[in-house]
Amino acid sequence: MVDLSIEFAGLKLRNPLIAASAGTTKDAVHCKKAADAGYSAVILKSIQEELVNRYNPFPRMSVIRNGIPGYQSTTFMTYEQAFEGEIQDYCEEIKKTKDMLDIPVIASLNCTNEETWAQYAVRCEAAGADAVEIVPSCPVGAFVREAAEFYPAASKALKNVKEAVKIPAGLKMTGQMTNPVICARNLEEDGADWLTMFNRSSGLQIDIDTMEPIMHKGFCGHGGPWVMQSVMRWIAASYPYVSLPIAATGGVTNYEDVVRYMLSGASAVQIATLIYMKGYDTAKIILEDLEKYLEKHRLYKISMLTGIAADKVLPLSEADRSRRYYAKVDYEKCIGCQKCFPVCIYGAITQKDSKPVIDENICDGCGLCSQVCNRAIIMKQK
Ligand SMILES: Cc1cc2nc3c(=O)[nH]c(=O)nc-3n(C[C@H](O)[C@H](O)[C@H](O)COP(=O)(O)O)c2cc1C
């Protein structure tokens, strides 16, 4: 039997899946759905101090099916605002959620004035919140803190909250800055109990007929499975320099994504978009698959995954450039789909009876045809 439980910033979690702050955790009823599906903690929808950020415009969701034809890509773009209520309503929701759930309930704050962070945190703690996530990183709001503006605001908020409450306080970072590793190190020194990497980033989509931005003509939050590689890159880069637990967030759709985030250095994973698009119960499948994965790899505790791949990242100077490869077709497996034809910029692929013929001498060995084929073209060492 494998053990999916983790210790995260002083919280005991039954597994690494946390329901991220979003409409999917907007109140106790929604948080209960997440808990019933297996999530180990819930982060309530953020409360924002700025009033205009509390009220949603409608409609506010856009699913952009973008990218190269034949290859999947999705962008989930939303103009979703914050918890619709005052801090006392938020605290009531924390109390209700605590009554209904037997897993940690985390409050999520985004304030405008320096002193309000601590005031809100104190009230959330008094209402029973098990921890608080500080979110200066909202991608859609009256003002968005990114790049050089982020750290000073995050640092002040964190220090104020840490002085005011005893519960753990995490910091949800934005990835929209020059060097998240430096920011992560500084936030650790400032006293963060965990780091969440990263909130969604601020984006824009334009309707080419009206020639106007869609979604209330504003910048809004966007993300999708395509953010994962960038988030993983920064988690892996931060992991050797930061001893805090990291919660990864962005683009998780299945157990493989959870495993990858943990291997890159995360201790837990926060999920929102998957719940919106496929429902709460997707967590059950992910958890079952995680157990099978651990059994297959003879790992008895999921926390053993954290950082394994981060420790193997090599600098550019150490990449093995000594071996050359060429692409070879296995004609028994080739179905003649012709996906490989357009991708060879070297002109090594010609066509015979709708199947590819690869000239080993012209083949560069880049591996792209093998990637788009995924079945019949394999890379052989020269
Ligand atoms: C519709 C929507 C609303 C969100 N609202 C919040 C929020 O209020 N506070 C917050 O910290 N993050 C918010 N997020 C970000 C999520 O918590 C999560 O970190 C992010 O979407 C990346 O994970 P995902 O790809 O699984 O969605 C929201 C995301 C979505 C899609």
Image (spheres, rainbow, N blue to C red):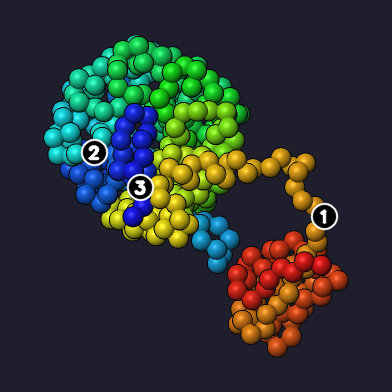
Mark 2 residue crowding within 10 angstroms, few (<14) / some (14–19) / many (20+):
many
Three-letter amino acid code at the position of disc 3? Leu
Element at label 1 = loop
Q: Which residue is mark 2?
A: 103
Q: Which residue is mark 1?
A: 322
Q: State which tag comes first along the sequence, 3 or 1.
A: 3
Marks 3 and 2: which is nearer the front? 3
Element at label 3 = loop
Element at label 2 = loop
Classify 159 as above or below 130: above
Return the residue nearer the eye: 264 or 274. Answer: 264
Instruction: Report x, y in % for residue 312.
Output: 63, 44
Q: Which residue is mark 3?
A: 4
Residue 194 placement: quadrant? top left
CA separation, marks 1 and 2? Answer: 52 Å
Instruction: Report x, y in % for residue 373.
Output: 62, 71
Residue 343 visible, this orientation? no
